Structure formats: structure tokens, C-alpha cells
Amino acid sequence: MARAHAQSGLTAEVFTDLAAVEALWRGLEADPACLATPYQRFDWVRAYAGATVAPGALRVVVLRDAAGRPRILLPLVVERRRGVAIARTLGGDHANYHLPLFSARDAAAVPAEDVIAALGQVGRASGVDVYALGHQPRTWDGAVNPLAIRGEAAPSDGYGMMLGPDPESTLRRAFSADARKKLRSKEKRLIEAHGPLAYRKAADGAEAERYLSAFYAQKAARFSAMGIDDPYADPAIRAFLSEATASENPAVEVHALVLEATGRVLATFGGAVDGARYSGMMTAFDADPEVARFSPGDLLLHHLVRDQAARGRRAFDLGVGEARYKASICDETIPLVEVMLPVTLRGHAYGLVATRLTRLKRRIKRDPRLFALVQRLRRMRAG
């Protein structure tokens, strides 16, 4: 562990070993006052880091106030690209939101310049050229994220909704009367065609692995048809998901719609969870026309919203990126920014290029004509 003192009054501790910071981290996230997303749970980060982070690359920055209280925790991974040392938020695109973990709501009110100064001090002491902090929410649960003040609007935002105490009322708010009627009809016809259905939540690692296997196959076929590289083909990502879904209180919950008689998996949905939120990370469905025409993914989503409200969670989101099924039920947009904090001149140059690329991606994704063109080119490449 290394320490750095910033003129802002914040003291930074840098841990390179998760075991050394585990007790502190778990203590912070167990406090009801903690402000974080499910992707800042220790168990989520441990599963991801254990499977994907190279030895020596992990950095967990803890910022303490003048009284010595831990106020902000930020897990990072340091990588080198073309001679530039980049400290990235851990989780990449598999984490929808890279909000720092704040010990309490007032910790998010620490002035942005103080947080940035402390990170700069850490960077200079540890040889970091630039911080690349992606998927930063502008606000979270009503609190402003101080890191987002320096951010560039991300190519895509997140989409979610608040859940209510009454599951049926929540469903009526999320799905129109016409949508609910169509889903009931599709569910009935699916049962008539293929037999009784079961909506399952993986109860243990073995059951989760069965649903993940179906997800990998369904997603691979989908990505291949779209001409997109499959991120779930990476053995490290599969190892991460296996670990994250294995415990009794998993960091990632996996739900599935299956045929009772055969166990055939018709649709899957996986999300990062904490006590208050289900955050969708991944979904897939069986593309067999004899199944797909009954919209198994929509049926599972309908059930999942009810299930999460019944479990007492307050919030539900479908992650980052535009999609029809997200727009149909989500009434909340979660604005995201990409944050570049240069520490050196080399890092400043890298940040300028990265920001230009972010703007280009945003322009393409938010222009229907340009985005449609990119999708056509991908399909052509896929043959």
C-alpha cells in the first residue's frame, strides 16, 4: 500500500492487493449511507479482477478526509498502450456504471477539484500518465458525481426505471395495457406449441452455468449474424461470470425462461445486483423461428420486472446502449460521460485523441442514418 498527500486535504491510499482492502471495502458497502452502483460491490470487482486483470495492474485508490475517514474508493486497472500508462476504471464495458464508491452522500459533495488534485498526486507518484474513467453517471440517486464535471458526453446513455412496492402496479407502469395483452397471448401460444414454461433464477453456480452456456451459444449466433466480435467468447470473461454467479449472494444474478419438460433455455437475462438495484448486463434468446416468434426475451423481461419489485429492490435498469426493448419500458435516462484526467503531457495528448474518438462514436450512435450505415457494413462484412 502506498500513500500520497494532496494539498486539497485528501489523503490517498493505493492498494495493489484486494485482500488488503477487503475489510475496509466491505465495511463501506455494508453501511446504508453508502452511495454506489452494483458494479462497485467488492464481490463483483473481485470476480472481474481475478479473471481479467494482469498481475501487478490492479490499483484501488482510497481517498480519506482530514479526519482520516475513508470517503471515496475507486478501483482501477493500469495498462500501457504505445508507451502511455492509462489508469482505467475496472470492468470495462461489462460494467454499465463506473461511479466511485462514496462512503456517504456527503462524500460525493467533496469538491471536484479536490478529488482531481488527489488523483493527480497519485498518478505522479505511481507513473500514471492519464486516467480514463468511462461510463461515469452525471448523477446517482440524486447526488452529483464530482468526476463527471470534467466529462465528455458518452456515445450512449443508460436506461432504467424505479420499482414500486406493488409488483403489479410497477408492471402496469412499465408495460402498456396493449403490451401486457400481447405478452399474455404470446405466452399462452408458446405453451400450446412447446409445453409448460418455468421462469427460473439460478439458485447456485451449477444452475447459473447451465443458463450461461445457453446464453453464450445464443449470443454467439447473434453477434455472428451482425458482424460483431463476440466479447463473451473470451475465456477470461466466462471465468469472471462463472465466479460472479457462483455464491449464495451472487454479484450477478442470472434468470432464464425454460421449457419445464426438457429444460431447454429459451431466454436469459443477467444483471449485477445489490440490495437496491438490478442492473442488466446481458440478455439473449433462442433465435429458432418456432420459438422467437413468441418473443421469449420480452416474456422473461416482463417476469423479471415483477420479480425484482417483489424482492424489494428499488431500481431496475437495462444498462448502456439504445435498444427497442429498453425504450419500451424505461422512463429514466441515465446520462453518462467519459472522463479523461491527464497527469503528464503524454497523457494529455492521449486524452485529446480519445476525446475526439468519443465524439465521433457519439455522432454515429446518435444519428440514425449513420448508425444504420455502420450496421449494414457490419452485416456485409459478416457475409
Image (cartoon, grey):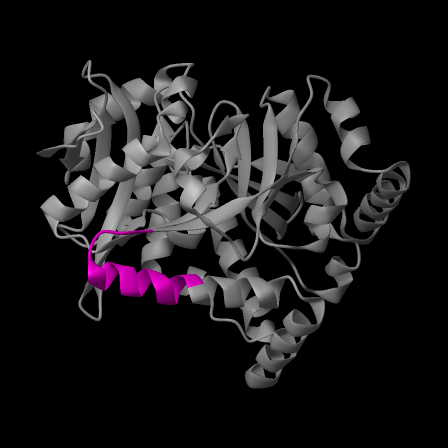
Residue 377 visible, this angle:
yes
Give the residues drawn in magenta, as a range. Answer: 341-355
Instruction: Out of 367 and 257, give the one closest to the viewer.
Output: 367
Count the labels in the image. 0
By secondary structure, the bulk of the magenta-drawn segment is best described as: helix
Q: Quadrant of residue 234?
A: bottom left
Name the residue at 48% across, 45% down. 96
Q: Is residue 315 magenta?
A: no
Q: Quadrant of residue 288?
A: bottom right
Residue 204 visible, this angle:
no
List x then y, in percent, for residue 316. 60, 33
Q: Is residue 348 magenta?
A: yes
List x then y, in percent, for residue 110. 35, 25
Q: Is residue 13 left or right of residue 237?
A: left
List x then y, in percent, for residue 363. 59, 65
Instruction: Out of 300 and 226, give the one closest to the viewer.
Output: 226
List x then y, in percent, for residue 176. 85, 38
Name the residue at 66% across, 42% down. 260
Name the residue at 85% across, 40% down. 184
Instruction: Out of 165 and 351, give the one closest to the viewer.
Output: 351
